[in-house]
Amino acid sequence: MNTKTAAADTKPKCKSGMVSIPAGTFTMGDADNTSKDGQVTVAAFCMDTTEVTTSAYATCVKSGKCTAAETGTFCNADATGHGNHPINCVDWPQATAYCAAQGQRLPTEEEWEYAARGTDGRLYPWGNAEPGGQLCWGGEGDSLGKGKRQSTCAVASIPAGNSPFGLADMSGNVEEWTSSPYSATDADRVHRGGGYEITYLSFVRSAFRISVKPSFQFGTLGFRCAGSLSP
């Protein structure tokens, strides 16, 4: 083995299915959203390339490390043909438990926004152009037409919307739980990203933040995991 190969083998890396996000500083928030604002520095970390899928979550349930997701209207756990769609209808403890079972965790909202926007101040994962067909949503330009989308899309099915780091569906499809509380005095947890039913531009911007009680389960809310680089 030559020295270049040896160096590559010892370089910290992410598990399969995750992207390595380098350390960086970015301006958090934008003029039209209520995100924390100002310069934020984020250490290097790993993040799932896609939202956690229904089939991946089902595997965790079968292992006994996760509890079953809610089923019924707008929920993917029992929806035919939705194995490669994002799991939804899971609360914050369920999302946290899934990530822990993978040796990971939920991302902070700072990590989430950085992974979605990069360092160049873009409004959306793909840039500053207003959304159209770059995401799974209910707005103008969606493949089903404005206001007609009633369910999620398969993960990573719209690569035009990928973030600067190559993450899929950081806008649209399902909103995503983070580990962060809405404020220092608020137990509600922040979720990010805008869901498939959203029609408002501001709701799918990378800086938009909203929160709900950790016990809530929505058809528009899922998650992805983050973690540390492995030696």
Image: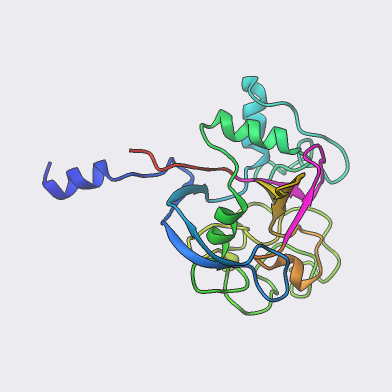
- Is residue 175 visible in the rendered image? The answer is no
- Is residue 139 visible in the rendered image? The answer is yes
**Range of the magenta residues?**
209-224
* Residue 146 vs residue 30, the one in the foreground: 30
Q: Quadrant of the N terminus?
A: top left
Q: Is residue 125 left or right of residue 16?
A: right
Q: Residue 52: horizontal and vertical position, in percent?
A: 62, 43
Position of residue 73 relative to residue 125, above or below, is above
Position of residue 3 relative to residue 133, above or below, is above
Find the residue positioned furthest to the right. Answer: 73
Find the residue positioned furthest to the top. Answer: 64
Position of residue 225 relative to residue 192, above or below, is above
* Residue 16 vs residue 99, the one in the foreground: 99
Which residue: 75% across, 71% down?
A: 202
Q: Residue 31 colored magenta?
A: no
Q: Quadrant of the C terminus?
A: top left
Position of residue 16 relative to residue 31, above or below, is above
Q: Residue 18: horizontal and vertical position, in percent?
A: 48, 46
Q: Main secondary structure of the magenta part?
A: loop
Which image quadrant for residue 63? top right
Q: Is residue 56 left or right of residue 79?
A: left
Which residue: 44% across, 61% down?
A: 24
